[in-house]
């Protein structure tokens, strides 16, 4: 049975898409012709036969895409990868990268920006900004007028951790796509 790396399979899908587009364009040309003009496919059985062959070829290529995508997805469910100490299947990591990481990054970025904005506004008004946890535990007598209700260092560390995960994940995906194989018949 023939095998392909995931990278080769993904490249083949892209190539098949281009081939289908060209075959569809050619099939449109064959849909109808003026009967007074000689059939350009006369020696191959005629335009009717040529059109049927092109349509079948398109269906075959579409089935190849389905096969490749199905095998890639099966491999993505089977292959496990550890990134920053967290193990998931490739499918889970791909889902995380597409649907979880971007909104999480935007949310963390918005919280960091919000704190910076509050701090800037407080400084302009001569107010004191402090971490809520620090004010509750310190008895230094300084009245904090603006309290930040989360750990800014932990928030910045989480933003950095997300970047590290995304960077390492991209490397792991490239490695696995280049080395893992699927059977494609």
Image: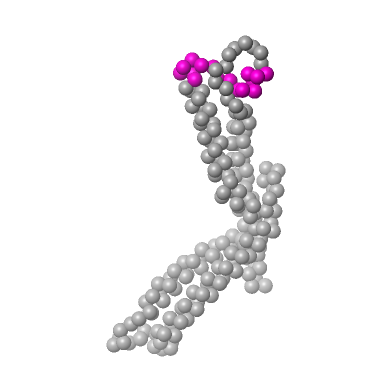
Residue furthest to the left? 36
In the picture shown, does residue 135 fall above or below 33? above
Q: Position of residue 88 (x, y in %)?
A: 68, 50
Q: Position of residue 184 (x, y in %)?
A: 63, 69
Give whichever of 21, 122 is nearer the camera.
122
Quarter-of-image position of residue 152? top right
Question: Does residue 148 show up magenta in the picture?
Answer: no
Q: Quadrant of the C terminus?
A: bottom right
Question: Does residue 131 show up magenta in the picture?
Answer: yes
In the picture shown, does residue 52 fall above or below 152? below
Indicate left or right for 70 with 18 as reference.
right
Q: Quadrant of the N terminus?
A: bottom right
Q: Residue at x 50, y 25 (%)?
A: 118
Quarter-of-image position of residue 74? bottom right
Q: Position of residue 155 (x, y in %)?
A: 60, 32
Q: Which residues are magenta?
A: 122-137
Q: How are the residues colored?
A: one colour
Give whichever of 148, 33 is nearer the camera.
148
Q: Residue at x 61, y 48 (%)?
A: 96
């Amino acid at each position: 049975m023939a095998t392909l790396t995931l990278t080769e399979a993904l490249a083949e899908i892209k190539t098949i898409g281009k081939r289908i587009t060209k075959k569809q364009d050619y099939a449109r040309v064959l849909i109808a012709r003026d009967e007074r003009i000689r059939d350009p496919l006369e020696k191959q059985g005629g335009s009717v036969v040529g059109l049927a062959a092109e349509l079948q070829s398109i269906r075959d290529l579409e089935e190849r895409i389905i096969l490749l995508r199905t095998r890639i997805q099966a491999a993505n469910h089977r292959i496990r990868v550890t990134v920053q100490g967290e193990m998931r299947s490739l499918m889970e990591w791909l889902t995380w990268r597409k649907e979880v990481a971007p909104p999480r990054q935007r949310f963390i970025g918005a919280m960091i920006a919000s704190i910076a904005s509050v701090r800037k506004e407080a400084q302009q008004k001569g107010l004191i900004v402090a971490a809520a946890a620090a004010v509750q535990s310190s008895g230094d007598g300084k009245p904090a007028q603006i309290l930040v209700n989360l750990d800014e260092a932990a928030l910045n560390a989480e933003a950095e951790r997300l970047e590290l995960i995304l960077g390492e994940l991209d490397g792991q995906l490239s490695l696995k796509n280049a080395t893992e194989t699927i059977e494609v018949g």
